[in-house]
Each structure stands twice: as C-alpha cells, then as structure tokens.
Amino acid sequence: MQQKLLLTLLGLLLGLTALGVFLYWVSPGWNETIDWRGIVFEAALFVFVFFWNLALLPHWKSTKILSLGSLLFLVASFTDVHDEFFLQPYWVNMLIEDPSQALGAGLIGLGIWFWVREKEGLLDQLQQQRDFEAVFEARRTEWLPTQADRAHLRAVQRPVLERGRVAGWLAPPARGINNMPALDFDYVRL
C-alpha cells in the first residue's frame, strides 16, 4: 500500500508540474494585482483536493468515475490558483479551467452516487446472507444428516476389498480406464 501511495504522489506531482510549466509557457506574464484572500481560499481548496486524490486514487478500480472527476477538479483548482499569480490567456479558462471544474464536479457527484449504490448493494447482500444463516440454523436438522443418519450410513457402507466386486452403494463402471476390464483389473495394488 505504501508503494501505491508513493506512486500516486509522484504521479500527481509530475502531472501538476507539467501543467504548471505549460501554463507558465502560455502565460503572457505576472499578474499585477494579487488578491491574497482569493489565493488563500483557492490554495486551501487545491490542497484539500490534492490530498483527497492521494486518498482516493490508490483505490482506482473501485471508484473510477469518482477518481476521474477528482483529477479533473484538481486540474481546475490548480489552474485557478495559477491564474492568481500569472496572467492567463482567455482560452485557458475556456478550454482547461472551466470545463475541468464543471465536468470534474459532475463526475464527482455521479461517482459518489454510484459508490453509494454499490455500498447499498453490499449491505443488501450481507442482509441476505444473515437471513440465510438464520434459516439454515433453524432447518439444519432437516437439511443435514443427523447422528442417526450417519450411524445408519456407517452400518450400510462397509468396504469391499475383493477383486471383481463393487460395494452395494456404488454403481459398477461400464468400462475401465483406457477400455481395460472394469472389474477384472488391479488399478491399485495393495
């Protein structure tokens, strides 16, 4: 689990670094007016979403839609913090930040809905299992052999060790292995 977490952290950091370099490359320069209140709240949201991704992404298989939405929301929040420091071309907002934020939030909502439905299904299965266990315990003597049944079977089922004979509770084979005689051949020598 530690290795998955480290790989997730490394992947997130590399991805965000690549996004930051790209945004810096397309930026025409520094932002002249810096709104520190906006930076604090947007950075807090980014940090929350970053650690949410660290907690969620190692479980990618069970929460694919939720993870994808969370990653898109991480890209949007990173881009939002970035535009507080650097000027962004209008197309960055239109093509990266706004669609990532809207689609990410929608996928997070859809992912949580699927996740809740999955958990409800698991709870239903557990309840059915408990119900089965209660019915099974109540009817155990009807469905499983009793001590008297077992004693009768032990009395009836006596081993037959003579060559060419089959025990009474078994059907004799039609033919033996590799079409050898079924009862007149020593398959096992004692």
Image (spheres, grey):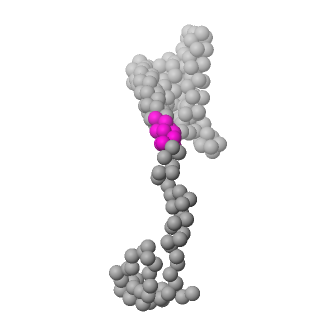
Q: Nearest the camera: 13 or 158?
A: 158
Question: Which residue occupies 58% across, 14% down?
Answer: 41
Residue 97 shows in the view: no
The answer to which image quadrant residue 12 occupies is: top right
- In the visual, does 176 lie left or right of 132? left
Give yes or no for residue 129 being in the magenta stretch.
yes
Question: Which residue occupies 54% across, 36% down?
Answer: 57
The answer to which image quadrant residue 97 occupies is: top left
The answer to which image quadrant residue 104 occupies is: top left
Residue 181 lies, with reference to residue 31, above or below; the image says: below
Question: Which residue occupies 59% across, 23% down?
Answer: 48
Q: Nearest the camera: 188 or 151?
A: 151
Give yes or no for residue 2 being in the magenta stretch.
no
- In the visual, does 110 lie left or right of 78? left
Residue 84 is situated, as x and y percent measured from the top left of the image, at 54, 16
Residue 156 lies, with reference to residue 40, above or below; the image says: below
Question: Which residue occupies 46% across, 32% down?
Answer: 120
Residue 37 is situated, as x and y percent measured from the top left of the image, at 60, 9
Query: Which span is picked out in magenta?
Result: 124-135
Residue 13 lies, with reference to residue 73, above or below; the image says: below
Task: Label the magenta part by its dominant secondary structure.
Answer: helix
Which quarter of the rendered picture does the N terminus lie within?
top right
Q: Nearest the camera: 141 or 113?
A: 141
Residue 108 shows in the view: yes
Which quarter of the rendered picture does the C terminus lie within?
bottom right
Residue 11 is situated, as x and y percent measured from the top left of the image, at 56, 38
Residue 183 is situated, as x and y percent measured from the top left of the image, at 41, 86
